[in-house]
Amino acid sequence: MEYDEKVSALALKIAFPYKPVLVRALISAAGGAAKLFGMDSCERSSLFLSQDLAGVLPASFTDPCKEENLEKASVECEWCEKSGIEVIGYHEPEFPRRLLECADAPVILFKYGNAELNPERSVSIVGTRRATEYGRYSTTGIVSEISEKIPNTLIVSGLAFGTDINAHKCALELGVPTVAILPGALNNIYPSSHRGIASKISKNGALLSDFTRGSESYKINFISRNRIIASMSDVTIIPESGIRGGGLITARLAHSYGREIFAVPGRLTDLLSEGCNSLISENVANVYTGIGDILRVMNWESKSGNGVQLSFYHNIERAEKQKILVSLSSERELSFERLAILTGLKPGELAATLTELELEGYVIGFAGNRYRINVLKNESLR
């Protein structure tokens, strides 16, 4: 009897839903999932005791090559075909090549949409679910700069509240391809309130999962989802994150895979910047102040083919403007009164200059007559 490689791999996935390393070890030792199912019980028993699987199989291991697992896998593949969902096996060229570089990569992925999963460049953006104005602004700026300087870069995230959904929305608005990795099956969008965005993503990107229908909802599902986000991209960016959370877990996973990490720094007193500041202080993440940081570290060329000069005030000539920008660069945010003291400018002169800087995009004004430098402005980095 001949066995289909994709169905066989999915049957192993069903038998060991949270043990991708074990599944890949079994497939590698047998020379293929279909070959494993094609062996008789004695051949498989010998394989399980072989040196190739020494130390890999758990003490409670039982033979996964059961007819019921194959039947479940076959039914799942049939349902996917009827639903327009692509089932991608690890052995197929459409499977994300970046995933294959990681030992714990899944052997089967479910894809709904038309996004290219092997783009020239891929960037993951993740962070806190309780994004602040600063975090939302940073996320928007990051996606906008990617759109302008490295177009057609794939934006990967997890459809979660906060940073994730902001990244997806901005990508959709700018026409940047985006992929959402789900912590459950494709027939059960999570969170359910994001079904509308998920539908748009499926038309302008793709929804991706390694879970079959009927999969239980466990906390480990999110870790499983995070590993795919981390491994599917060349770069992971954290615009905002507390000291704990999925964004930080994803960043550390990406670091373990040898990927480059970038984090937007924040004030030491901001709880939702603690994670970013920690990653930077531990040398896990590079500091992100603008797209130039990624272009330099990754040795990527911008759309124009030119490097980006990281000098904030290169094209600022007026001394009044320079004084304001230098003062703001030392603090995340300053009041009008504090700026007047630091710059020595008269109130009228300061107000007029601040207005000019706001119109030019160098400075952002907030309620309470407070101001912040726009570190994500492209022109200020040239």
Image (tube, rainbow, N blue to C red):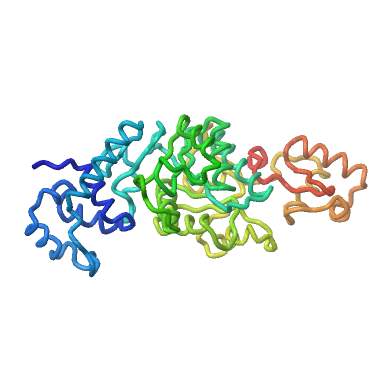
Count of marks, rendered view: 0
Residue 358 screen position, x and y as percent: 77, 39
Of 135 and 46, nearer the camera is: 46
Taking depth in this image into account, of 204 and 366 the one nearest to the observer is 204
Q: Is residue 380 visible?
A: yes
Residue 323 can be seen, yes or no:
no
Residue at figure coordinates x 72%, y 54% from the top left: 332
Quadrant into which the C terminus falls: top right
> In the current view of this chain or complex, which residue is farthest to the bottom?
59
Q: Is residue 114 left or right of residue 165?
A: left
Point 44% across, 49% down: residue:
183
Q: Residue at x 37, y 50 (%)?
A: 215
**Rendered location of residue 331, percent (x, y):** 74, 56
User: Seen in the image, is 352 located left or right of residue 70?
Assistant: right
Residue 313 position in % (x across, y down): 71, 44
Give left or right: position of 232 versus 262.
Answer: left
Quarter of the picture holding the N terminus: top left
Front residue of 311/9: it is 9
Query: Residue at image x 84%, y 40%?
Result: 353
Q: Position of residue 154 (x, y in %)?
A: 46, 38
Residue 96, above or below 263: above
